[in-house]
Image (tube, grey):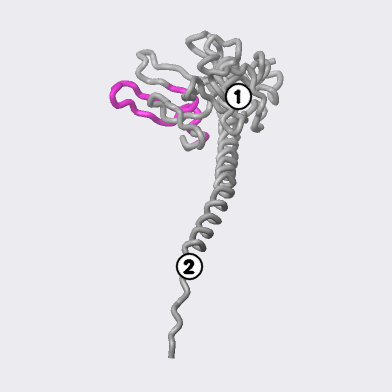
Amino acid sequence: MTLERPRAFTLIELLVVIAIVAILAAILFPVFARAKAAAQRTSCLSNTRQIVLAWSMYAGDHDDVACPSYYYSADFTLETAWDFRMDWTNWMEAKASLGLLGPYTKSGQLNRCPTFHGESWGRPFTGYAYNSTYIGGDVFASRPVAPLGAIADPAGTAVFADGAFGNPPMAHNFLRAPSDPFFEIGKTHFRHDGAANVAWADGHAKASNRLHRRDPGQPGLGALSEDDAAYDLL
């Protein structure tokens, strides 16, 4: 009785299978990448919604006055901002904790965009920026914190947005209007396939792809409006 030898793959068949797998991978990998980017964009948008909700709750507990952008202790050893607090008593081992919105957000992860990994210079929570030109104020520029009643168009006034500056994009925490002298270091980052997630003073959040003040040297960075219309209290 003759035993049949088990049939094995020929070299050509093996090469065909490898080619098919490679073609499928080339087709599916971009799909998976887009799906991951979409999930991260959705997560980021959820973060901005929760941050502006925390901002509204803070104002409700403080006579309807917005959260300050930042301030320092008299000796400058304690830096307190909307998203973090840094104890600089020992510069080599600075201690970080949640900032002014911390009691409402309960988590620093809300302040971290899942797609942003820019340099943050030791600041613990990065990716989002707070409108300090008109809303949160700036103690060094003598800009006051805004009462909510002063915001004439809440649905058209940006409070938080994806933020960055420079090339490569680096972190900042304070969103600056185009007229602000510090606009160059307080830009909006359209990092989500050409869109930026923005939270507005009426509490809604959505993606915007209207990039103004485009700078070829800083791709994806710019302003939410050509002038201060998307930032001011009018």
Relative depth, front residue between 99 and 18: 18
Residue beneath disc 2? 9
Alpha carbon of mark 1 to alpha carbon of mark 2: how far? 63 Å
Residue beneath disc 1? 159
Q: Which residues are magenta?
A: 80-106
SS of the residue at dot 1?
strand
Measured from the top left, where is residue 201 in percent x and y?
64, 26
Q: Mark 1: few, some, or many residues within 10 Å (few <14, many ≥20)?
A: many
Tags 1 and 2 touching, CB below 8 Å: no
Q: Nearer the viewer, mark 1 or mark 2?
A: 2
SS of the residue at dot 2?
loop
Measured from the top left, where is residue 18 in percent x and y?
50, 57
Q: Is residue 136 visible?
A: no
Relative depth, front residue between 53 and 195: 195
Measured from the top left, where is residue 70 in percent x and y?
48, 19
Q: Is residue 26 visible?
A: yes
Quadrant of image for the N terminus: bottom left
Kindly identify the residue that appears in the image at 60 percent across and 33 percent down.
Answer: 193
Left or right of 225? Residue 66 is left
Kindly identify the residue that appears in the image at 62 percent across and 16 percent down.
Answer: 213
The kind of residue on which mark 1 rests is Val
Q: Mark 2: few, some, or many residues within 10 Å (few <14, many ≥20)?
A: few
Kindly identify the residue that appears in the image at 64 percent across and 27 percent down.
Answer: 200
Left or right of 160? Residue 86 is left
Relative depth, front residue between 3 and 105: 3
State whether residue 78 is above or below residue 205: above
Measured from the top left, where is residue 31 in percent x and y?
59, 46
The kind of residue on which mark 2 rests is Phe
